[in-house]
Image (cartoon, rainbow, N blue to C red):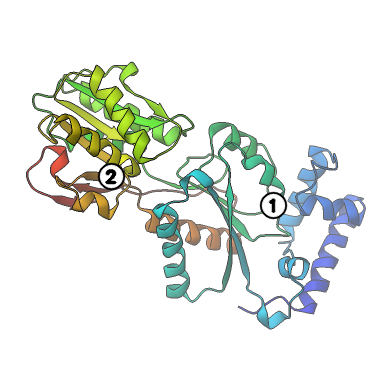
Amino acid sequence: MKGIDMGKKQASKMQIKNIADKLGLSVSTVSVVLNGRGDQVRISKETQKKVLNAAKEINYQPNIYARRLRQAANEEAPYVLALFWRRDNLNSRLGRFLEGIFQTIDLKELKIELVVQAYEPGNFMTYMDMLSSNRFSGAMICGLNEEEQKALEEREITIPIVFIGRDSQIYHSVLMDSYRTGEECAACMNLSGVKSAAFLGFEKTGRAERLMEAGFLFGCRSHDVVAKEEWNPRIEKSSYEIGYQTAKQMLSDMELPTAWLVADCRLATGIMAYCRDVGICVPKDLRIIFFENSPLLRYNRPALSSVDIPSQEMAKSALDILILAGESRMDIPIRRELLPIYQIRESSGLEQEENYK
């Protein structure tokens, strides 16, 4: 693909003028709507919808780079994609996701500029105006809460959007079945003789984590394991100290042996340190699986089990969807569900190590 040249720049201007003439609007009004600023300047929803529909009918192609960079045509990339990622999840998962994107770019010889924008939990709405065809060809969004997703789905967005880890009837999505994953984590444990079960999660969490919790507790209860809501602590962030203190709190209230699903592998060192200090034996007294894999889990003694998001596969699927949606201008949302990655080791109470998807 070639970069945007001066001919395309003029074509973009002509397209805006044609839309304005067709709808009886000013060029500035049409330009504001196509730039994603219609709500900001109080243009009616009806007018915005007419402009967006007219743009879609003529396959309007925004001159992204001419507006953003003003670079020479031969230096420009045809796709400018945004990746929005929550700041409290800037961990190895992001690295694997980016690796998946770059592998796809190399394999398919794509020319893509990627912009990564971190945002605070619950603060995505401050970046809404960035979701404009004047800035990006498409966007991938990870970590939204329900309120943010609802607000985003109520907006008229002019570029393809892919939700990572969340389902949607409006936008494209790449996700895994979190409830079933929780159930399967219970199935991956030796629950024979286990008397209690708990899920250790976060205060500020999304629907996916809550579904995983529900699936895990259901799976445990189906084996007659007691799982009380008050046994499921909510923490603010991950650290050695928080892992240590949370394990101390949980083990003082629960009958052994017990089974836990822990929402972050970064809590492992603190939890295991407390168990060693008080003589809790894993997996005899505590069967445990951590969410997200880490080399630290494999080389711990005993080796610790994990369930992980297939981040690289999610990235590849999300990028494929954005390219397809950008080229075909499709309106039907694409939904791709991927399987989690299990690393079943000693801490689950199973003798052998199993790796499967």
Identify the residue shown where x is 93% and y is 53%: 26
Q: Is residue 184 visible?
A: no
Picture quarter containing residue 253? top left
Q: x%, y% of residue 251?
A: 23, 23
How much space separates mark 1 and mark 2, taking CA atoms?
34 Å
Q: Is residue 318 visible?
A: yes
Q: Please state which of residues 273 and 140 is positioned toward the viewer in this rendering.
A: 273
Location of residue 121 with respect to 196 vertically, above or below: below
Q: Which mark is residue 75?
A: none
Residue highlighted by disc 2:
307
Location of residue 55 with respect to 246 vertically, above or below: below
Identify the residue shown where x is 50% and y is 43%: 143
> Considering the numbered disc 2 on the image, is that residue within a helix, a strand or a loop?
strand
Q: x%, y% of residue 118?
A: 57, 50
Q: Earlier in the sequence, mark 1 or mark 2?
A: 1
Q: Please state which of residues 75 and 160 is positioned toward the viewer in this rendering.
A: 75
Q: Amino acid at mark 1?
A: Met
Graded by Cα atoms within 10 Å as few (under 14), some (14 to 19) or many (20 or more), the crowding at tag 2 reads: many
Is 268 left or right of 123, judged from the image as shown?
left
Location of residue 336 with respect to 228 vertically, above or below: below
Q: Which mark is residue 130?
A: 1
Q: Amino acid at mark 2?
A: Val
Q: Please state which of residues 237 and 356 is positioned toward the viewer in this rendering.
A: 237
Is 103 left or right of 186, judged from the image as shown?
right
